[in-house]
Image: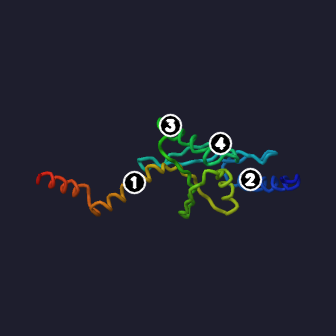
Amino acid sequence: MQSASQHETERIELINQIREWNENRLDLFEISFPNQNLEFFGAMRFYFQGDDQKYQTKCLRVSSTATTRDLIGPLVEKFHPDLKMLGCDIYGLYEVHSNGEERRLSEQDRPLLVQLNWGKDDRDGKFILKNETKVNRQREMNNNASSVGGVGTAGESFKRDKKRLSKR
């Protein structure tokens, strides 16, 4: 267990880190100072790339104690309220940086803390919600297409099938 002085030192360091973050951000994305339990809140922007390849964006007020697992459900509901009941797709939350670096957040990661640490590392990024079920299906289709008959177009496949049927 932490001593009172360690707890206060951690709180002061956190306040300084949040103060630095807030100085460089719009008021909308200001992070609150931590309470006695070191919990704080901030508005975060999340992105989702739709089937049309365009990005949608939504903002959520997030607690520093919220994990990736806690956020996936509300994000899916915000981006796709009509698909909420289906619940069969798998989603992942990724942090993507301007240099192209991308990392899938684990279920236990705390996105607000991840974002706050970008300031320490002098980085900037964004969070993208990805439908991993669609990505996996696409990967499987590509693998199946390359393993069955090699690379070819759908038109070539149709012509082969038509030729086989006409021989019968």
Q: Residue at x 60, y 46 (%)?
A: 69
Q: Which residue is mark 4?
A: 61
The amino acid pointed to by label 3 is Lys
Q: Position of 113 compared to 38: left or right?
A: left
- At mark 4, the secondary structure is strand
The spot of residue 92 in percent (x, y) is 54, 50
Q: Are marks 1 and 2 in contact (CB under 8 Å)?
A: no
166 on left or right of 35: left
Q: Are marks 1 and 3 in contact (CB under 8 Å)?
A: no
Find residue 138 and name its label: 1
Q: Earlier in the sequence, mark 1 or mark 2?
A: 2
Amino acid bearing label 4: Arg
The kind of residue on which mark 1 rests is Gln
Q: Going from the N terminus, do you reach mark 3 or mark 4 first? A: 4
Are the two marked residues, 2 and 4, in contact with CB atoms closer than 8 angstroms?
Answer: no
- Residues under labels 1 and 2: Cα distance? 41 Å
Which secondary structure, mark 1? helix
Q: Secondary structure at mark 3?
A: loop
Q: Which residue is mark 2?
A: 18
Q: According to the image, label 3 marks what residue?
A: 84
Where on the picture, by quarter, is residue 122?
bottom right
Q: Secondary structure at mark 2?
A: helix
Q: CA distance from mark 2 to mark 4?
A: 16 Å
Compare residues 24 and 41 and report the one nearer the observer: 41
